[in-house]
Amino acid sequence: MKEQDQRLQEQLHQMRLRYLQESYAPLAAEAAQKHWTHVDYLARLIDGETQTRHQRAVQRRIAAARFPTIKLLEDFQWSWPKKINRPQVQNLFRLAFVADKANVILVGGVGIGIMPGTGLCRAV
């Protein structure tokens, strides 16, 4: 490894830019092969770093929430309970209430609210 590459690796590690550290060389090769501009190359690096940081932040928040189980809307048994407004629950997962800055309160019998509640929190 060249001295310059080693220094760059150390700096990226120190700055905690994991995606850039792992991807700058392969993306540079691809950029040279496909004749990207410098700005295109930089934009792809920054986009990858941004996406990676966002994914890690979401995972940290989910871990911090300490949900009892991780369930998705697709896993919900719609056959039980008998009285559940399926279209209304599914509509909540469109997350329009977030843009409207509205609250959502789930009310139901014991054990019914955990799955839709945790699934809705993960979706947000």
Image (cartoon, rainbow, N blue to C red):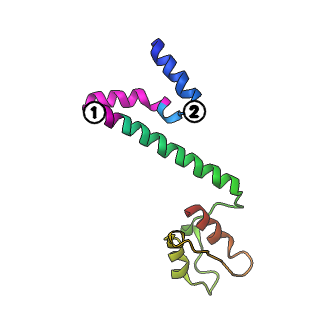
As for residue 79 lying within the magenta part, the answer is: no
Please tell me how crowded label 2 is: few (under 14), some (14-19), or many (20+) other residues with Cα within 10 Å: few
Q: Position of residue 34 (x, y in %)?
A: 26, 32
Q: Is residue 62 visible?
A: yes
The kind of secondary structure the magenta stretch mainly shows is helix
Q: Residue lying furthest top in this view?
A: 3
Q: Quadrant of residue 65?
A: bottom right
On the picture, is 120 further left or further right than 35? Answer: right
The magenta region covers: 21-41
The one nearer the camera, 62 or 85, is 62
The one nearer the camera, 15 or 94, is 15
Local secondary structure at mark 2: loop
Label 1, on which residue?
A: 37
Q: Quadrant of residue 117?
A: bottom right
- Which residue is at a point 56% across and 63% down the rendered structure image? 124
Q: Residue lying furthest left in this view?
A: 35
Say what amino acid the circle numbered 2 marks. Answer: Arg
Label 2, on which residue?
A: 16
First-in-chain label (2 vs 1): 2
- Which residue is at a point 63% across and 80% down the rendered structure image? 80
Say what amino acid the circle numbered 1 marks. Answer: Thr
